[in-house]
Image (spheres, helix red, strand yellow):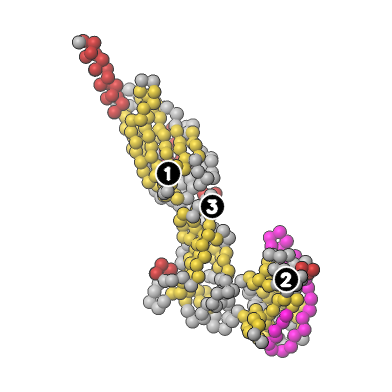
Amino acid sequence: MYKKLVFLSALLIAISAKAQLTMTVEAPPSGLFYKTQLWNILMINSGTDATQMSIELILTNSSGQTVLTGTTPFIPVSAGTKQLQAADFSPIQYEYLSTEVTDHDPNGFLPIGTYDACYNLNVIDQGHPKQLQQDCISITVEPLSPPILSLPLNESVSENPYPQFTWLPPVPLNMFSLLTYDFVLVEVQEGQTSAEAIVQNMPVYFHSNESNIFINYPASGTPLDTGKLYAWQVIAKNEDVFAAQSEVWTFKVREDSLWSVLADGQSFVKLTQDPVSVITCQDILKMYYNNEADDTSLVYSISSLANEDLGAVVKTGTIPIQFGENFIELPLTNGDRLLEGKVYLFSVINSRNENWGIKIMYQQGTNQ
């Protein structure tokens, strides 16, 4: 009988000692997130002796997929309250179970997204690890900066009813495993704010899963109306999951900004002093130029806009013109050193020292 009492007393003491160790995980604020921020944990040992413990972290994404796990070595926790951080658990062993995580540095970033982080507190029980407690929190990882809109400028007036939209990517980029963008363009109705319009109105143009940081309003689309106010926004996604969104900017189109002119049933693209959008052309580049300077000819050049040979001139020549409206047809061939799919700048300078031009993407025609 005495031996049974001694055994039961020892067992109760052991159970009591285990129950006296508790943890509270401190959820970090939403925003930029390092792996080290996952390990801010308050440990309370209400016993009198130090207790060996280990923590296992399981991080799952919004789809329920386990993204990574992290396991600490067993460390002693003395009696009382102690605030522990990543350095106290070092070395932490991570296992990466998803391609979402591109930064495998223990001090690196977590990928953009919303996650559940569950922590298992383990102690040694009869020589084997035993889970004593589980604590779960939700965390949201956001970029330091969302996409920043660039052109057209906010509240500006565009010269082109087929504008090009550009922006800067969110930062830091290494938080993204697969960064893409959704682009939204809407008309702002009278009495609406731009923020209301972008949410409530049917898009004039919507484009998803764009990997570049620019979008051209399609030449096949209806030209934007000169009497309307437009709003646009860019949404960044990581692995097709929302990450961040830009501000909403607005612009109008100048009333005299006809992008192309019809002549004899053919469309001729206007030369402008600030060419933005890129047009696709094949055998013949058809251009409209209003010769107000009363020049008799224009010297032109075609130069590369590619990063690897920016500014390299591939073709030059002279075009005879007359006063007033000119509908110019310039033959293009791959013999002109034009490469298919590459973007070039066609430019001229008149006697007033004004630069006029157009950006073109060359596609080899069927006749070549």
Identity, as a three-letter code, of the amino acid under mark 3:
Leu
Relative vertical location of residue 240 with respect to residue 262 in this rendering, above or below:
above
Relative vertical location of residue 238 with respect to residue 348 in this rendering, above or below:
above
Task: Name the residue nearer the viewer: 198 or 265.
Answer: 265
Q: Which mark is residue 366?
A: 2
Q: Is any atom of residue 225 visible in this view?
A: yes
Q: Which mark is residue 178?
A: 3
Q: Earlier in the sequence, mark 2 or mark 1?
A: 1
Identity, as a three-letter code, of the amino acid under mark 1:
Thr
Q: Which residues are drawn in magenta?
A: 302-329
The residue positioned 73% from the left and 61% from the top of the image is 309
The residue positioned 79% from the left and 79% from the top of the image is 318
Relative horizontal placement of residue 333, taking residue 217 as reference (left or right): right
Local SS, label 2 = loop
Residue linked to disc 1: 60
**Residue 242's x, y, as percent?**
45, 56
Q: Is any atom of residue 300 visible in this view?
A: no
Identity, as a three-letter code, of the amino acid under mark 2:
Thr
Quadrant for the N terminus, please.
Answer: top left
Q: For residue 335: magenta?
A: no
The residue positioned 37% from the left and 32% from the top of the image is 121
Q: Residues within 10 Å of mark 3 (few under 14, many from 20)?
A: some
